[in-house]
Amino acid sequence: MKVGIALFPSKELQSRINSYRKRYDTHYAVIPPHITVKEPFELKEDELARLLENLDAIRKGIGPIRIVVNKIRSFQPVNNVIYLRVDDDPALTELHDRLHHPDFPNTKSYHFIPHITIAQDLSDIEHIDIYDRLKMIQFYHEETIREFHLLYRDDSGTWKIYQTFKLEGE
């Protein structure tokens, strides 16, 4: 089964982001706006119980994650993805680092840049046009996230929550 780990912002922020994603993001229908903290990886059924134990242990000692979103950026020239930059937060960095411990499959393709995707799978021309328009938008939002989610991809390709883990703090 294909699994991944993500944070979901509030419904208020998701709604605002979806006003852009429904036009520009080919993954709009398969997953809500999110911050990926562990890229998708393959997991065998007999490995699931151990993963759940590890995730339960990981959450301990990590407090709520404060996110501040205030910049529209792009990953170009690496790829034509436009995203909302999430400012660094020590709890978010700690969660990411713990999820990339040797006990977990190595799925790290890129340096960790916390973000929420708003546009992807764009041609070069589309990317330039859309990014030029979006980067002029004034965008600011801050909130606290108190949980992360183990997601799985179902047979239709849609990502669903398998289990939620509350962040406990010290």
Image: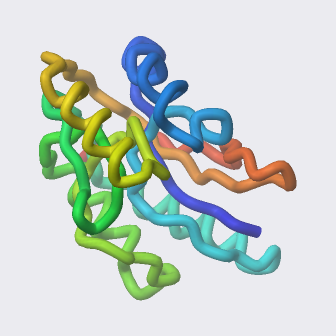
What residue lies at 42% left-to-right and 52% top-to-bottom? Answer: 123
Q: Residue furthest bottom?
A: 102
Q: Position of residue 82 (x, y in %)?
A: 31, 43
Relative to residue 100, is residue 141 depicted above or below?
above
Identify the image quadrant of residue 14. Answer: top left
Q: Is residue 108 left or right of residue 47?
A: left
Q: Residue furthest right?
A: 155
Q: Residue 139 or 65: which is nearer the viewer?
A: 139
Relative to residue 41, is residue 136 depicted above or below?
above
Q: Residue 162 or 57: which is nearer the viewer?
A: 162
Q: Can residue 15 be seen?
A: yes
Relative to residue 11, is residue 5 depicted above or below?
below
Q: Position of residue 103 (x, y in %)?
A: 47, 84
What residue lies at 26% left-to-right and 50% top-to-bottom? Answer: 114
Q: Residue 23 or 34: which is nearer the viewer?
A: 23
Q: Position of residue 85 (x, y in %)?
A: 20, 41
What residue lies at 51% left-to-right and 56% top-to-bottom? Answer: 5
Q: Residue furthest front?
A: 125
What residue lies at 66% left-to-right and 41% top-to-bottom? Answer: 30
Q: Is residue 166 left or right of residue 94?
A: right
Q: Position of residue 110 (x, y in %)?
A: 30, 73
Identify the image quadrant of residue 31. Answer: top right
